[in-house]
Amino acid sequence: MAISIKINKNPQSRIHLCDFENIEFGKIFSDHMFRADYTDGQWQPGTIEPYGNISIAPSLSALHYGQSIFEGMKAFKDPQGKPQLFRPLENLKRLNISAIRMGMPELPEEIFIEGLKQLVVLDQAWIPTIDGSALYLRPFMFATDDFVGVRPSNNYSFMIFCCPVNSYYPKPIRVKVEQKFVRAAEGMAGSAKAAGNYGISMLPTMEAKKLGYDQIIWTDGKNHQHVEESGTTNLFFVLEDNLVLTPRLDGNILNGITRNTCIALLRAKGYEVQERDISIVEMIEAAKQNKLTDVFGTGTAAIIAKIATIGYEGADYELPDPEKRVVSNWLYKTVYNIQTGKEPDPFNWIMKLG
């Protein structure tokens, strides 16, 4: 259902300041943003306004008690130059799952979808067309009570801003298996896309980078025996007999939309995909025997992040040449081509805006 959104256009576009061939991920923002507020027990009509700073109180509830969730998604242009979104209803579904877990109000579909549509159409000139690029969209919700007290906020803001991006990982990455810190445990909020889940990752990732790694692989909180996520991505392991493994959704990891996309594509291609507990020792043994042919992460920002090296208990295990891998290279090309309309969309994942 279409809703009325008040649009206050930016009188001076900044697009001429953007070098689309050299964009540092997450640092350049388009001309407009969307905002809708939750007050008096209901969502109010949204507005689109020029991108800029927002005013908050020092006692803002979200700053002190962590009621803050977000999504990551992208807009693309098809070969005719028309803007389109990739699986936006899945992002809404996950946003609302996160909201429920964090004690926040669910967002109505019409606010989410209409806000996205009208914002992307308005700023469609910001969608890059260079290979591997996109307009990254950041929907997020946060508590806005001007109150210091441990209780759910009565008021919230939902916003969306956009930033043109190039590749998230410009080269294959080195990852270290984390065996000290824990991202999530049973009964916690690991499956929610909550800001705090990323905040607690900063220190262990910093420590890994000091050792020459780009990211970490989280392991389970009980015994550090089973792999979970890696940074901002879900994990996949490919064995030589075309068996693809990925950790099951046990409540501790994010239900990735790119993860689900890749599983659907792999199964349609004839691969056997198992969603199960995956022992890190099992994968290291497979690497030693040259049976581990591909390891990669999946996520909105990277699409496919090829893993070149796994560091485990002081030793590095080098994986096959990323450029020669069959599965991860095929998946990246297929997903990106569907997103940009260069290949058919057999699963009806694309929402066209023009």
Image: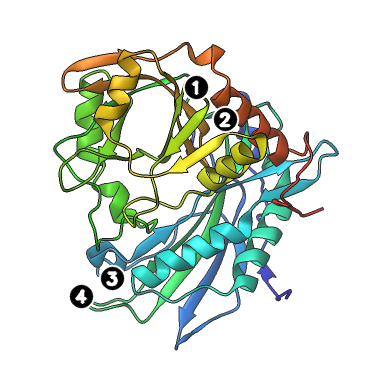
Callout 4: SS: loop
Q: What is the quadrant of residue 332 in the picture?
A: top right
Instruction: Name the residue tied to disc 3.
Output: 61
Please tell me whether residue 76 is drawn above or below residue 238 in the rendered image: below
**Residue drawn at 65 percent across, 72 percent down:** 110
The image shows residue 290 at horizontal and vertical percentages of 38, 13
Q: Amino acid at mark 3?
A: Ser
Nearer mark to the viewer, of 1 and 4: 1
| Cα gap from disc 4 to disc 3, whole angstroms | 7 Å
The numbered mark, 2 or 4, whose residue comes first in the sequence reads 4
Please tell me whether residue 320 is drawn above or below residue 259 in the rendered image: above
Q: Amino acid at mark 1?
A: Pro
Disc 2 crowd, CA 10 A, few/some/many (<14, 14-19, 20+): many
The one of 98 and 277 positioned closer to us in this rendering: 277
Please tell me whether residue 30 is drawn above or below residue 316 in the rendered image: below
**Residue drawn at 33 percent across, 25 percent down:** 214
The numbered mark, 1 or 4, whose residue comes first in the sequence reads 4
Instruction: Name the residue tied to disc 1.
Output: 170
Instruction: Name the residue tied to disc 2.
Output: 166
The numbered mark, 3 or 2, whose residue comes first in the sequence reads 3
Q: Amino acid at mark 4?
A: Val
Question: Which residue is the extreme one toward the bottom?
Answer: 40
The numbered mark, 3 or 1, whose residue comes first in the sequence reads 3
Q: Does residue 24 show up?
A: no
Q: Amino acid at mark 2?
A: Asn
The one of 338 and 6 positioned closer to us in this rendering: 338
Question: Which residue is the extreme one toward the right?
Answer: 80
On-image quarter of the N terminus: bottom right
Instruction: Name the residue tied to disc 4.
Output: 148
